[in-house]
Amino acid sequence: MELLKQRILKDGVVKDGNVLKVDSFLNHQMDTVLFGEIGKEFKRLFEKENVTKILTIEASGIGVACMTGQYFGVPVVFAKKTQTKNIDGEVYTSRVESFTHGRVYDIIVSKKFLKAEDRILLIDDFLAKGSALSGLCSLVLDAGATLVGAGIVIEKGFQDGGSLIRNRGIRVESLAIIDSMDSTTGEINFRN
């Protein structure tokens, strides 16, 4: 998605440790016009999959998932990283490690929101090592639902997450795949 790539080149900042800071438009301050274009693109890519629900993980994936859900006309569910009093009844859980935060979380979704008859599209802002996406996949499988694929805004192609998920036979559509980035020069190279 050329619009996204140009925005990454313009406003993305490469930090040490393979961190791409895109908080000015993606995961802190949100550019809703860009999110709308991202949602349209995910709709185009997955429109034949009869999606009935979108699943993401809190917090950074929620905005993109909501815009995508608007184009599909389906509910968006997000996996919570902490058990709260608002989650009652039985839950699906999975363990994920956050690349950004360097922590392990138990993600939780109420069983009343994931059903066997659902056709679920996963949406997330980043794919690096694949832990969050694997955790979301596990929730879908535990529910007995159909996983139609995953829409990723930015994939770090130089890390192994995308390969790990694709090797499991899961369709992954990333709108921008970064092949390399350099914190010294700030250079970002995309896969074509």
Image: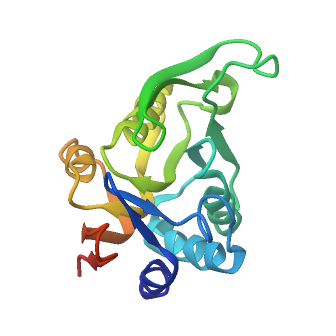
Would you identify the image quadrant in which residue 133 lies? top left
Q: Is residue 82 above or below residue 1?
A: above
Horizontal relation, residue 186 to residue 139: left or right? left
Q: Residue at x 56, y 40 (%)?
A: 118
User: In the rendering, at what x and y percent does residue 137 appear?
Assistant: 41, 36
Question: Farthest residue in the right direction?
Answer: 86
Q: Which of 46 and 187 lies nearest the eye of the viewer?
A: 187
Q: Is residue 178 above or below residue 167?
A: below
User: In the rendering, at what x and y percent does residue 141 appear?
Assistant: 41, 29
Q: Residue at x 31, y 66 (%)?
A: 183
Quarter the C terminus occupies = bottom left
Horizontal relation, residue 38 to residue 80: left or right? left
Q: Which of 172 and 128 lies nearest the eye of the viewer?
A: 128
Q: Residue at x 66, y 42 (%)?
A: 77
Horizontal relation, residue 165 to residue 3: left or right? left
Q: Which of 87 and 154 lies nearest the eye of the viewer?
A: 154
User: In the rendering, at what x and y percent does residue 152 appear?
Assistant: 43, 60
Question: Farthest residue in the front direction?
Answer: 184
User: In the rendering, at what x and y percent does residue 20 appear?
Assistant: 42, 62
Q: Residue at x 31, y 56 (%)?
A: 18
